[in-house]
Image: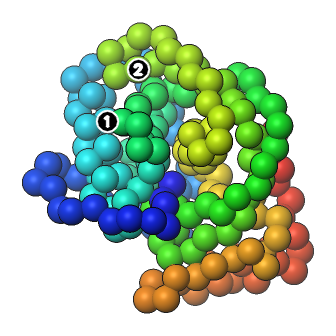
Amino acid sequence: MRTSEGTNSTRDKPTRKVITFPNPTLRKKAKAIKTVNLEVRKIIGEMIETMYAAEPKGIGLAAIQVGIPMQIIVADIGEGPIALINPKMVSHKGKEADKEGCLSLPGIYAEVERWSWVKVVGLNKDGKKVEIEAEGLLARVLQHEIDHLNGILFIDRVKDWDTLEVVEGYPVPEELWKFIEAHATAGSTKSNG
C-alpha cells in the first residue's frame, strides 16, 4: 500500500523491483511458508527496504508484489516496521471507507470500504506465533496486503469509481483504464468478507 504523503531518501540497502499492474503475478495466490529460515528473514529485510525506498514511500508491501509467491507482508504506518508470515484475518468488526493507493498501481487512488478493526494472526520473522489487533490505518494496511496474498487488488474492491484520483505525471497503463471502464459501468462485484 502507498501513502500520498511524504517521500523517502535513497538508501544503500538491498531492494527489490515492485511488480506493477497488469503483471499477471499480482493475480496469483501466494503459498504458505513452512519453515522460517535465513532466506525468509532476508526477503523480509529487502521488502522493508523496498517499501521505504518507494516514491512516495510505501506503508505496506506483500511478497507477491516483488515477484515472490510467499505469504509474507510488511507494514510501517510510522510506528516501526512489522512483518507477518502466513497472516490470516481471524476476526473483524465495523466498516469505514477511505482512499487507498498501491505500489503496484502507482499514481492512482480510490475509496475502498474495509473493516475498521481486525485481528490478524501469523508468524513473526523468528517463526513465533503473533496476534495483532489493529484499527484505523494499520487495519486497512493489513487487509490490503493480505488481499495481495490472495491475488486481490484494491481496485477489485472499489465501489464508487467517482472517487478515483489519478496523480499527474504517472502513466496509467491502458489495461488499467480498460479495467476501470469495465468496472465503473458494471459496478464492483467483490465485497469484504
- Position of 169 with respect to 119 (left or right) is left
Q: Amino acid at mark 2?
A: Asn
Q: Residue 177: which quarter of the image?
A: bottom right
Q: Secondary structure at mark 2?
A: loop
Q: Name which residue type carries label 1.
A: Ile
Q: Position of residue 9 (x, y in %)?
A: 21, 62
Q: Which residue is mark 1?
A: 44
Residue at position x 81%, y 44% from top?
Answer: 95
| Residue 22 position within the rendered picture, expressed as x and y whole percent measured from the top left | 53, 70
Q: Nearer the viewer, residue 73 or 96?
A: 96
Does residue 38 sit above or below 106 in this rendering? Answer: above
- Give the numbered dot on residue 3: none
**Circle 2 sits on which residue?**
124
Residue 117 image offset from top left, x and y in percent: 72, 33
Label 1: few (<14), some (14–19) or many (≥20) C-alpha neighbours in 10 Å? many
Left-right relation of 189 to 15: right
* Quarter of the rendering occupied by the C terminus: top right
Residue 143 appearing in the image: no
The answer to whether any part of residue 48 appears in the image is yes
Residue plotted at (83% across, 37% down): 94
Which residue is at a point 48% across and 11% down the rendered structure image?
129
Task: Give the mark nearer the N terminus: 1 vs 2.
Answer: 1
Indicate left or right for 107 with 91 as reference.
left
Dot 1 and dot 2 residues touching (CB under 8 Å): no
- Please tell me which residue is depicted at 71% across the width and 22% down the height of the picture: 90
Q: Is residue 147 left or right of residue 124?
A: right
Element marked by disc 1:
helix
When asked about the image quadrant of residue 111, the answer is bottom right
**Cα distance between the residues tagged 1 and 2:** 10 Å
